[in-house]
Amino acid sequence: MKKLGIDVGGSHITVSVIDKNIINEQSQTLIRKEINSKEKASSIISLLSSSIDEALIESNNIDTIGIAFPGPFNYEKGVSEVLGVGGKFETTFGIHMQQALKNNTGLKNVPFVFANDADCFAEGAYFRHNLSSARTVFVTLGTGFGSAIMLDGELIKKHPDIPEGGAFYNQPFLEQKADDYFSVRWLLAEYKRLSGENIKSVKAIANLNTEISKTVFANFGRNMGTFLFPWFEEFRCEELVIGGNISKAKALFMPALEGAFKELKIKVNIIFCDDAELSILRGATIIADKKNKIQMEKSIQYKRKTTQPLLPVQAIIKENGEYNVFPSFPSESQVFVGFESLANQIAGQKIVVIDGFGGVLWENFRHHLNSALIEKKKNVLWYDIDSCLKSSEEISKMIKPNLNGDDPVFGKKYLGELSDFFEAEKLNKLKPDASTDICIVYGTGASLSNWEGQLIYVDVPKNEIQYRMRAGSAKNMGSNDTLAYSQIYKRMYFIEWPVLNSHKERLLSKIDIIIDEQRIDEITWMKGNDFRNALNLMLESPLRARPWFEAGVWGGDWMKKNITDLNQDEVNYAWSFELISPENGIVFEGNNNLLEVSFDFLLFQDNKKVLGKAADRFGNYFPIRFDYLDTFDGGNLSVQCHPRPEYIKENFGEAFTQDETYYILDCEEDAEVYLGFQEDINPDEFKQALIESQEKAEEIDIVKYVQKFKAEKHGLYLIPNGTIHASGKNNMVLEISSTPYIFTFKMYDWVRPGLDGKPRPINVEHGFKNVYFDRKGERVEREFISKPSVSKEFPNGRKVSLPTHEEHFYAVDRYEFTGEIEIETLGQCHICMLVEGDIAEVSAGKNSQKFKYAETFVIPANVPKYKINHIGSKKAFVVVSYVKDNWC
């Protein structure tokens, strides 16, 4: 098979058919055309496409197309980022050029690979000249100062002895940057400085053969040697390869360049490449082959790393008493399936804005929707909003104060806006080409472009984002770094999710289409008005979030045995995220199809209807969470505490802290709860024991310091901030807590690694700044184990109050009954669970849902009262939690 090499210059393009097996082949086809690089984007794309079509007439068995295109450019994606280069190709800014050329040529199955022209020159020259040097520097001298660096014949972009990306052009030299000295404009300016005369071209200066013209080139060569010397010395460069139009005047600047190297005592073999264009063309195809191979390897990698299944497309209804891992809410509206139906919806639009949450696999999404639109004979230009992002370095500097260095867990919430991550000038430069059928700007933050068009929002559940992060398919916004999962998650949690949530809230009322992207090849979607109506309907009804499940080093098998739809091959289940609003989704059903969005959309729609009296204090933060901790046949949790209110606010930026309770849903006879200190606790001795245990990897007798109590089924253990605690093995804990949920200061973890074999983070210093040592001895049983009391009796049951600690802002009640009861919300949101019984039919007005044993459900404060009818003859227990009135 043959390749197509393309060199896109400022004034011309060259297209060549290349047989990669022949080193110095004269091209079978060589097409040169003039190009107006300031034309509108569609004209530039059309010229490139027609040139490719013309080359294919001569040779249609092309398997790869390599394109050398001037930067700035995102060569991995094939997206133009050209700005600030004198207007050349700036009309293509933001355009997915790779997709545009595929669409225009119809070569949808042929890889189009873009590369920097200096990189192409390096690859081609190394190949064509049969070079063997180990440390080689390539420079191209023309309108700009291009460079590329090879180590053992391979291009390198990162190395301690070379500039970032192998680029010399932006490195400081004398009073400016290198590009200002080693380019056509410097030669023209230098000639004018010395002679006082303007001259049109470098060639004209070279042809003068005067003292002034000779001085200009001598200065050029001497400067180049002086600039390159420190880099060459560090990198130990063996060979310098020079190409580009200015290199044709080598006889005029070569003596000065060699003289500078000799004076600076550096030995470098200098090669001038007279066939730079052919080298670039050849190099473009070499890079295309290499990148295509890498891309093929990436394409077979998993996009998610988990044993947990995706939400199915169609609803699963369980009429029996089985726990449903895929609960859904009837939306009374249509949920559509697939990219084809979406293409039908937007095909008549001129401009489309596709925004969405971080973690969406945007390139996969674009590929599928583009294919569906092409089937409808639509000419589409895709504009990538990422082209407007600030540089990775700028973003890293901006958020550095919030990341707490390399701490594996804790950062501080970023208080800025999504727009902080983008350059306003670039956003203003992103303009649609009116001559195209459809212009689509896409990506996280796309609506910041301020394009007037149909607005689509693409959502993806937080658990799915984490599965993608673990697989390496979802990364941080604007990051070029390869980070560990913990660092990616930390940046998501503290930086990106807060700004993306605020952005999503602002867009909610404007959304024309909402998309669930978790099934990357089969999306589901709703129309915006239908979506908002479904949210409003949910705000009047009992509802349930979609739970998700995680294994952990201490995890057990209670959930495996009692929730039959869970993957039984998972090593264990440590957690069920029943209702942790920052990470749970809500699922709408329409015509039996399912669409999931983040839980916080409910709060964005109307937080007062969700939270009632508590909305003034908590706003869009859902205050209470329910989750499971399963240690049946597992292990003990780490001995831990949570931060005091002032500490979490000052250090992590949270509005309130993590005050917990353990409700024992089920337990074995030997199950225990670790809670509070022994009466004779010595803080210094305890700290020393913890540090030595960590340093020596030796277990300690934790009961010497921490009390433990027998776990009682349906007992409630109180864990306000600063309280030392842990669940022992053989418990199934319903953890009722305030919503912050990652601020666990592990002080002792039984000297065990995580499931990944790596040490789990231990936070002794954080712990000792927060733990209360006066919570000890008899006081613990008296104050931190709830003493239930009957607060109300009725003919078929009773209401039991399970008092929480004065520092808990939420209350816990338990209703014990047969048949049906009615509960008033009294202006508060109720979070509930059937902790004994089979099926609870919960109704509010005309709306009702059935919830099974161990399922969590929510009654919005907008619902004044609700009925619970237990289907079955035995007594039902329902736990209800809500914000205390005096905390609103």
Image: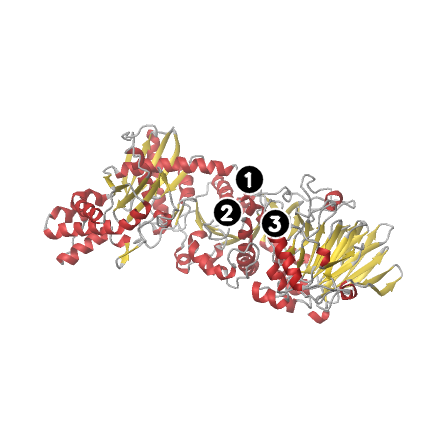
**Whether residue 714 is visible:** yes
Q: Is residue 224 left or right of 769 when viewed as pictured?
A: left
The residue lying toward the viewer, choosing from 343 and 849, is 849
- Residue 214, given in percent of the width and then of the height, sits at 13, 49
Q: CA distance from mark 3 to mark 2?
A: 17 Å
In percent of width and height, residue 614 lies at: 68, 67
Q: Nearer the viewer, residue 252 or 133?
A: 133
Residue type at tag 2: Trp
**Secondary structure type for disc 2:** helix
Q: Report the colour scheme.
A: secondary structure
From the image, which quarter does the C terminus lie in? bottom right
* Mark 3 surroundings: few (<14), some (14-19) or many (≥20) residues within 10 A: some
Label 3, secondary structure: give it. helix
Q: Comparing marks 2 and 1, which lies closer to the viewer? A: 1
Q: Tell me the number on the disc at residue 302.
A: 1
Q: Amino acid at mark 3?
A: Asn
In this view, the residue in front, 283 or 735, is 735
Taking the spot 45% from the left edge, 57% from the top edge, the residue there is 395
- Report the residue marked by disc 2: 362
Which amino acid type is marked by label 1?
Tyr
Residue 463's disc number: 3
Say which label, 2 or 1, has the lower sequence index: 1
How far separated are the C-alphas under marks 1 and 3? 16 Å
Q: Residues within 10 Å of mark 1 (few under 14, many from 20)?
A: few
Q: Are marks 3 and 2 in contact (CB under 8 Å)?
A: no
Task: Tell me, for residue 887, which label it has, or none.
Answer: none
* Placement of the N terminus among the 4 image quadrants: top left
